[in-house]
Amino acid sequence: MTSPLNVVVIGGVAAGPKTAARLKRIMPEARVTLIDKDRIVSYGACGLPYYVEGLFDDINTLMETPVGVARTPVFFDKVKGFSVRTRTEALAIDRKNRQVRVRNLDSGEEADLPYDKLVIATGGYPFRPPIPGVDLKNVWFMTHPDDARTLVEEIQAQGLKKAVMVGAGFIGIEMAEALKHRGLDVTVVEMVDQIMPGILDKDVATFAAKHLRAKGVKLVLGERVTAIEGDTRAAAVKTDRQKIDADLVVIAVGTRPNDRLARAADLDCMARGGIIINEYCQTSDPNIYAGGDCVVNRYAGKIAGSRLFVALGSTANKHGRIIANHIAGKATPFSGITCTGIVRAFDFTLGRTGLSEQQARNLNMEIETVTWSGPDMPHYMPGSGPFIIKMIASKRDRKLLGVQVAGMGNGAKRIDVSAAVILLGGTLDDVSDVDFGYAPPYSPPIDPLATCAHVLTNKLDGLARGISAFEAKAIIDRGDALLLDVRTPQEFATVQLPYDVVHIPLGALREKSAELPRDRDILAFCKVSMRGYEAQLILNAAGFDRVRFIEGGIIGWPFEVRNLS
C-alpha cells in the first residue's frame, strides 16, 4: 500500500494556509503539516489600518472566519484536516534528505520534519531603515495584529496626538487616514517627491496629494528621514531638511521578500531578493514550491524577462491554489501579475494596473497617454463622484498597457476591467467593446473607461490634440500660450485657473474665433475638457493649427485653483 504524500508548509499567513486547505480538499489522503514561528496564523494583515481607524472593535476579527470562528490549530485540524504547529521555526532545509530542521520556540527542542513536497510561504518583512531611533518606544511597523493592537492601546493610554508616517505607499496612505479619523495630527514623510512612488505616475499622485492635503494630512515630500529622536520614546522625526515633532511614528517604507531559507538551501533567488518560481510556483528544486511575498512574479503583460516583487495578499492566495493543484496533479499555470493595486484615501480611490508611464518609457516602449476626468455616474444621479483615469497604450499595436485612477468615483470597477483586458492582451478597441453593466446608479451609458479609450484612440489618430496638466503648466509657466476657457459664465464665476485667461463660452466660439490670435499656441479647457476638445476641433476647422486642449480640465487639474464662490 502506497504511503500518503507528506507535505510540509512553512508559513501560516496567506499562501501557506491556502495551499494546505486547497490540497486537503482535492487530495484528502495527503498528510499536510503547516509550521509557523508565530503564535497566531491565518490573519488578515491588510485589515490592520481599518482596525486602527476604528471600523471594527475587536482585533481578533482578523483571525476569524466570516462567521466568527477563530482560525486556530484546532480549527484547521478539525475543519480543514491538516496539522498546524505554531511557535515552530524552520531553521534549515536539507534538500538531499528531504527534511526540514525545526525548533520549538517554547521548549527549545529541535527535530527534523521529513517531506515529499515542501512549500515555502515565509512572506515578506518590513524594511527597517538604518537610522538612529527605530527601536525607540512609540515606533511601530504595521505588519502584525499586535502592532495595530498596541498602537491603539498606547494612543489611548498616553494620549498621543502627533503622528508621523515614514513612507507614502499603500500602508502610509491607509494609516494616515486611520490616524486622522482618530483625531491625531498626521504628517507623512516620503523621500521621493510624490506620494505612492513606483505605483502612481507623478501627475496622478499630485492630483491625489491635493485631496490628502485638503483632508488635513501634512505631506513632506522629497525629504529623507535621517533619525528618530527621543530619550526612550519617539519625540521627533528628523529629515535632511527639518525636524518634525512626533509622539508616535509608523514606519512603512516597503517590504522585502523573506527568502533566507531558500538562499541557504541554494535555491535560485534574485540578486535583489525573492525566490524564483516557474508558472506552477516550483522553485529550482521541483519538490519545493514557493508562494506569497517571498517570491518574485512574472509580469503577465508578455514583457520578456521581467520579474517583479509585488507584495499582495491576493497574489499569495492565488499562489496557494496553484501550488496545491500542481501537487495534486491538476496543473494550472499561473499567468503572472499585472501590478494591480488599490487603496482608499478618505473620499478618493487610488488605483493602478499594468505598467506606469514611467515604466513603459524605461522599457523604451513607443506609447501614448491620455487623462480623462468626469463623473462615474450620470450627473443627475445623487452620489455621482468625479474622478480621473489615466490610460497608457502602445502606439505600435494599440494594446492597453496601463491604467491609473484617482478620485471620488468608482475607480475599483474600472481598474478591475482594465486588469482583465491587460491580462488577455487586449487593445483600446477591446476596452470599447466590453459589455459594461449599465444603469444610471452605476455608470453613464458609455462607461468612463470606454470613453477614456475613445479619447486615447482619437489622440492616436491625430484627431484629439490633448496635453497633460503637467505639460500644460510647463507651457503656461514659460508664458508661451493663450489659455482659452470655454465654460459657461456661471461656471467661470465659481472657479478658475490662477492665470490670465480668455473666456469665450463654447457656444460663442464659432462667432468669436476671429478675436483669437493665430500666431500663438492656444490651450483650451473646460470643466472636464470635453468642451475643450470640441473647442480644438472648432478652431482647427476655422484654420487655427496651434490649438490643444488640457486633458482633465478643471476637475483633473492637480495644482491649485482660484475658488471664487
Image: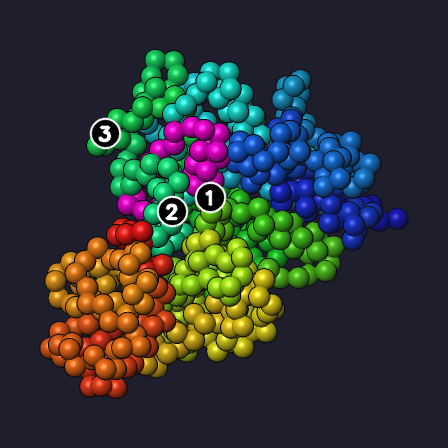
Q: Residue at x 37, y 37 (%)?
A: 216
Amino acid at dot 3: Gln
Residue 206 at x, y percent in the picture: 32, 51
Which quadrant of the view contains residue 451?
Answer: bottom left
Q: Which residue is mark 3?
A: 242
The 10 Å Cα crowd at callout 1, few under 14, some 14 to 19, many 20 or more, is some
Q: Is residue 549 above or below residue 42?
A: below
Residue 184 location, x and y as percent?
42, 28
Q: Give whichever of discs 3 and 2 has the lower sequence position.
A: 2
For mark 2, what is the residue?
211
Give the mark nearest the N terminus, 1 or 2. Answer: 2
Magenta span contains residue 196: yes
Gap in Å between the C-alphas at discs 3 and 2?
24 Å
Helix, strand or loop at mark 2: helix
Judge the density around disc 3: few (<14), some (14-19), many (≥20) Cα neighbours within 10 Å: few
Using the image, determine if residue 522 lies above or below residue 385: below
Q: Is residue 394 above or below residue 283?
A: below
Q: Which one is earlier in the sequence, the residue at label 3 or at label 1?
A: 3
